[in-house]
Image (cartoon, rainbow, N blue to C red):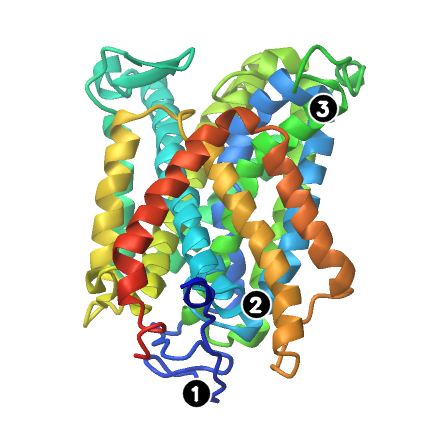
Amino acid sequence: MSKGLFITKPIQASPHVDAGEPVEGSLQGEVTLKRTLTARQLTMLGIGAVIGAGIFVLTGHAAAEHSGPAIVLSFVLAGVACALAGLCYAEFASMLPVSGSAYSYAYATLGEFVAWFIGWNLVLEYLFAASTVAVGWSGYFNSLLTSIGIGLPASLSTAPLNVVDGSIVYTGGLFNLPAVAIVAAISWLCYVGITQSAFVNSIIVAIKVAVILLFVAFSVQYVNPDNWVPFIPENQGPGKYGFDGIVRGAAVVFFAYIGFDAVSTAAGEAKNPQRDMPIGILGSLFICTIIYIIVSAVLTGMLPYAQLGTPKPVATALEAYPSLLWLKHVVEIGAIAGLSSVILVMLMGQPRIFYSMAQDGLLPAIFKRVHPKHQTPYVGTIIVGFFACLLAGFFPIGLLGELVSMGTLLAFATVSAGVLVLRRTQPALPRPFRVPAAIVVCPLGVVACLYLFWQPFREHWPLMVGWTIIGFLIYFGYGYRRSKLRNGA
């Protein structure tokens, strides 16, 4: 049985790149989706997934509670960990241009059991992250409505459940209507087609990057260097200030980076994946890291870091300067756009992971149904959208946020290890992009991701264990017996 658990999926080579045909470096039996995405669109997808919650929500919380002005170093630390994993993702995505992201890569290198484990963790990254960001989107949207005098009542903009001191309490709200509405609208957009989704995402990315540039350009003159002193505040307890706070801050803002690997889930729809996937992954990661560092430096320079611990830190900083109040409304619009694109990319990624798992027989065949007109995994999109609406409508933003980061960190560590495994097991396989100094980069990627997983999230290990047990029950109850690879299909 143990041998069957770690069976790996064969890799085949073929020169075809048309929709419905295998592609060079594809996994055996993989049927591709419609290939329409360019390197520019893939880069915009990555920026769309990454720029959002990190700048508009998490930056202030991490600075106020963990890092202080050294939030800049937290972003650098998280960015380095992502860059190491990103190099590994780029090698895999150029070599295996298929849907499924880390799940597909693990299946080809570490075996079916590990692939299922990673695929199950990716549900945390995509489905739960989309719901979490939708709750943040709702906050900014309702704030904008309130500023023009038509804000929604708390009963329709607040989740009915919250967690206080480890206990679930009732808030008095009915459900979070704006969060449900945005998830439903974006799910429909994902249903009608990847081309339309990528086009809308490109527009959204242009808007929010323009808003961020406006914020930096007009706010930099109000930066007071005294607010950066001390740059690393003294340690005040576990995870608060000092080097420990920088690490905890990096783990918190890691949520802001989780979208970059969503580019790899669209590998099966890239026109020239061998060239475009590395550009899309590494390009979007580099651009987003630079933006995060600049914005976090300006924010902590405008206000003392302790005052930034609000759900809307950028708007909070602008409210302190009457001459910048006009920019506050612009930022709210940018935040709404930015968080919308994050939800879009997450809701695009999750059905495609389910699609790949169903192709392999590990999930029911309903998840691999492709719409005859739109050529999208439409049933999976509907199912994912339904559950995302439930999570966004009834649960608070902080409940599952750290579990999202934990699942993502494990996926990143697995991909980093998988590159070295495949280098050893299949050294002759064509690699259009190769990780430089892989013997150093790959282990560093594993260590960096596991360190960020291990240190800050120790109190959440029981939840992660429970989630993992549920996944294993599904695998052994369904996937293990129906695996096409194990049954020779």
Q: What residue lies at 26% left-to-right and 26% top-to-bottom?
A: 394
* Residue pictured at 41% horizontal, 67% vertical: 4
User: Left or right: 479 with respect to 120?
Assistant: left
Q: Quadrant of the C terminus?
A: bottom left
Dots 3, 2 in contact, CB < 8 A: no
The kind of residue on which mark 2 rests is: Phe
Q: Is residue 129 visible?
A: yes
Q: Image quadrant of residue 296?
A: top right
Q: Of discs 2 and 1, which sits in the foreground?
A: 2
Disc number for residue 244: 3
Identify which amino acid the numbered label 1 is placed on. His
In the rendering, at what x and y percent does residue 16 appear?
43, 87
Using the numbered discs, state the Cα–Cα distance from disc 3 to disc 1 in whole angstroms: 50 Å
**Residue lying farthest bottom?**
15
Task: Count residues near mark 2 (Cα–Cα under 10 Å), then give few for <14, some for 14-19, many for 20+.
Answer: many
Q: For residue 16, which numbered disc appears in the image?
A: 1
Residue drawn where x is 27% and y is 64% of the image: 481
**In the image, residue 301 above or below residue 56:** above
Give the CA separation, mark 3 to mark 2: 33 Å
Secondary structure under badge 1? Answer: loop
Mark 3 closeness class: few <14, some 14–19, many ≥20 residues within 10 Å: some
**What x and y, as percent, mark residue 475?**
32, 54
Q: Which residue is mark 2?
A: 92
327 with respect to 391 (left or right): right
Instruction: Point out the tag, 3 or 1, that comes first from the N-terminus.
Output: 1
Tell us which disc is closer to us: 3 or 1: 3
Residue found 56% across the figure and 27% down from its top: 458
| Residue in front for this viewpoint, 420 or 96 | 420
Of marks 3 and 2, which one's residue comes earlier in the chain? 2
Q: Type of residue at label 3? A: Asp
Label 2 and label 1: CA atoms lie apart by 18 Å
